[in-house]
Amino acid sequence: MTLHGHTWTMTTPENASSPADTAGTAEGAAPADLAWGNFSASGPWVLDRDSIEWSRVAVLLRGMARREVPELVKSRRIPPVGRLLAVVSAFAVALIPWWVKNRRNRFAGPEESRAHLSLRLRVAIEKLGATYIKLAQIISSGEGLFPAELVDEFKRCRDQVPPEPWDTVRTTVENDLGARLEDVFTSFERTSLAAASIAQVHRATLSTGEEVVVKVQRSTVSDVVRRDLRVMSWLAPFLIGRIKVAALANPPALVELFAETILEELDFRMEAANMVDIAATLRELDQNGYIVPRPHPRLVTRRVLIMERLSGFNFDDVEGMRAAGIDTEEVVRTGMIAFMEGALVHGVFHGDLHGGNLFVLGDGRTALLDFGIVGRLTQTRRLAFMRLMLGATTNDLRGQVNALCDLGALPRDTDIDAVIRDLGLDQPTVDPTTLSGEELVAEVQRIVKALLAYGAKLPKELMLYVKNMVFLDGAIARLAPDLDIIAELTNISLIFMQRHGATIARDLGVDAATIQVDMGSVKAGLGVEESVDSLTYRELRERRELIQRRMRDHVMS
């Protein structure tokens, strides 16, 4: 959730504090938890990883959520009829008037048509509640993958969702904390600072006189999400082959993927544990450009989460950051390295990056928020992910396809050589800007058809990582449009190999001396010939817009 423009500070209620919580906060002393986690330099409490009450159950809760998925998405003859009718009617009300107006050519052009449709879909989604709002949030992170009008409209679902009534919020907080609001807080603002799909955030003042912020889960979200997943799993088989964005994974698989993602957001004890794990990962990687707010060691329940609040610049406030002397290119550069390292070296990374979930501090560091979705790779998949990234920078085609099989993106018995041949991976790079719209559409259709024939799908962790990279791609457009992409990717590859080459060689059982970065492979991924030495992001964006325009013009002709 976006929570910019406010300053959060936090102290603990007297009945929730202990010597362990405040150890290391004496004047002039650095908090002891900075030795193992990336937190603020002077926090309101200190976390002791061995004594955090909610962390003991987080692993069990995560396992329970995974085991629940098959039951929620299994094939069933009869769906929750009432909810199904509500969903169908909501989308019918949104789509039918737009369809009629579009058929009568009452829009000035395709952009206006898409904008109108996006608005009507957003309104319908907000009425349907948390599950569909979460889907809209995922789409809003897909700049470049979805129409710009849809992305812009759905961004409003990040933190501008209608909040729950005050009486409902009060009941939830009191039930989960086990005390009257007046016994814990001297004031609790009824108007939320931000409201999103799963929860909303309120400012309050503790009985000690200190201001706090309380994240409160929507009262019925747990039941609604599970009911919606049953409806989605019933509808999904009827949508096979009918939704363009589902081209690389059939709708039932997409529903299962979505279920795996959203169930872990329904218990804030898992989110708080994610915060601690990400902070520890960043510390081990010496990624000082990122910090995590401290969750409270005791005031975390299934539906209430209290954490340290940090303040900074909205991630889109480029002018404000530059006026404050912040190097926005360095902000992007740090992000590109940090998330790749987290996934490859430790197998843990923030899985829901978008402009509302991070902001930049006055000193140039970036604070991460909202840890409901975190990518966690098993050792097998972490090594496969490592081989995939290594193969992309060393031009090892077989290694990349093998890694995709181990990640679950392709069946394990896939014919590796056939995939390389059918996708044309072993052919010279063709500059896509030299192709006509007809040729571009035909090439995309050819690749999609080949992938579907091999049973390709998008595993959860790979989907989260790709989604994050799409976000970072958009962040470069705003924060560093003149960044030389080729030079930066070359530099990042070299830095990564210098820092982790020995670890990669050990984990994969290869000789570090034989690992050679091949920038020709990286350039091919960007769609440019090996002879190209420089490519700014602005130029890359122009190339993409040209390709998209040619494809769109061909489809509409």
Image: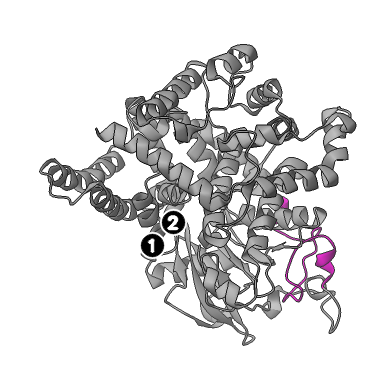
Q: Which residues are magenta?
A: 31-56
Q: Amino acid at mark 1?
A: Val
For the question of whether residue 185 can be seen, the reply is yes
Residue 197, label in figure:
2
Q: Quadrant of residue 77?
A: top left
Residue 134 locus on image (x, y percent): 44, 50
Q: Nearer the viewer, residue 7 or 185?
A: 7
**Residue appearing at x 43%, y 53% in the figure:** 221
Q: How dense is the environment of label 2, judged by Cα within 10 Å: few (below 14), some, or many (20 and up)? A: many
Residue found at the far front of this picture: 531
Q: Nearer the N terminus, badge 2 or badge 1?
A: 1
Q: Quadrant of residue 382?
A: top right
**Residue appearing at x 53%, y 23% in the figure:** 456
Instruction: Tell whether position 50 is magenta.
Output: yes
Q: Amino acid at mark 2?
A: Ser
Magenta residues, dominant SS class = loop
Residue 24 locus on image (x, y percent): 85, 75
Residue found at the far bottom of this picture: 209
Compared to residue 516, the image places residue 266 above or below, namely: below
**Residue appearing at x 76%, y 62% in the figure:** 288
The residue where tag 1 is placed is 161
Query: What is the CA distance from the residue labelled 2 to the residue labelled 1?
Result: 7 Å
Instruction: Tell whether position 469 is magenta.
Output: no
Q: Tell me if label 2 and label 1 are in contact, CB under 8 Å.
A: yes
Q: Nearer the viewer, residue 36 or 72?
A: 36
Label tally? 2
For the question of whether residue 76 can be seen, the reply is no
In which quadrant is the C terminus drawn? Answer: top left
